[in-house]
Amino acid sequence: MAIKAVLREELNNSLRIKKKYEEELSKLPLGSLIKKKIKKYEYYYIVLRQKGKVKFIYKGKKITPKIIKQYNDAKQLRAKYRNLLSKVKKQIKFLRSSLRGKEAI
């Protein structure tokens, strides 16, 4: 049953990759940076979810371009890793169901 051995190996690799993606996601800063315009002034906030509720954290009127770039990069990486994580979870589900199948007599 060489096929089952290959599937088990691929499942182990997928689980390892899933763990890596989750670790990379946890390293990214939480939330997204947004700019609100109130009357004629602009204010920066970090928006995130805590316990199922949306929370706005005030960051000030002016923010350095470095921080803006950091949050924009984090937003793109977060989307990338979530997409990859979704794909690897589907692969894990498929591999587990394939390994659970009954062997031919």
Image: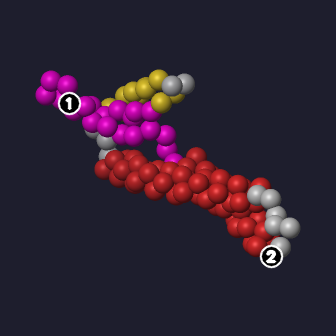
Q: Visible in this render: residue 15?
A: no
In the displayed orientation, state which residue is furthest to the bottom: 2
Name the side, left or right, on which 33 lies relative to 17: left
x, y percent for residue 60: 32, 32
Between 28 and 15, the one nearer to me in the picture:
15
Question: Which residue does the image show at 49% across and 40% down from the upper left?
Answer: 30
- Give, as a three-letter code, the residue at label 2: Ala
x, y percent for residue 16: 69, 60
Secondary structure beneath label 2: helix
- What residue does disc 2 label? 2
- What residue does disc 1 label? 37
Q: Earlier in the sequence, mark 1 or mark 2?
A: 2
Q: Which mark is residue 99?
A: none
Question: Which residue does the image show at 44% across and 51% down from the upper left?
Answer: 79
Q: Which residues are magenta?
A: 28-48
Q: Visible in this render: residue 22?
A: yes
Tell me if residue 4 comes above or below residue 22 in the rendering.
below
Scheme of image coloration: secondary structure
Q: Neighbour class for label 2 at 10 Å: few (<14), some, many (≥20)?
A: few
Q: Neighbour class for label 1 at 10 Å: few (<14), some, many (≥20)?
A: few
Name the side, left or right, on which 65 lies relative to 46: left
x, y percent for residue 54: 43, 26
Name the side, left or right, on which 24 lies relative to 48: right
Question: Which residue does the image show at 13% across and 28% down from the upper left?
Answer: 40
Does the magenta portion include 101? no
Secondary structure beneath label 1: strand
Question: Which residue does the image show at 71% across and 60% down from the upper left?
Answer: 98
In the displayed orientation, state which residue is furthest to the front: 105
CA distance for labels 1 and 2: 62 Å
Quadrant of the rendering where the C terminus is positioned: bottom right
Q: Nearer the viewer, mark 1 or mark 2?
A: 2
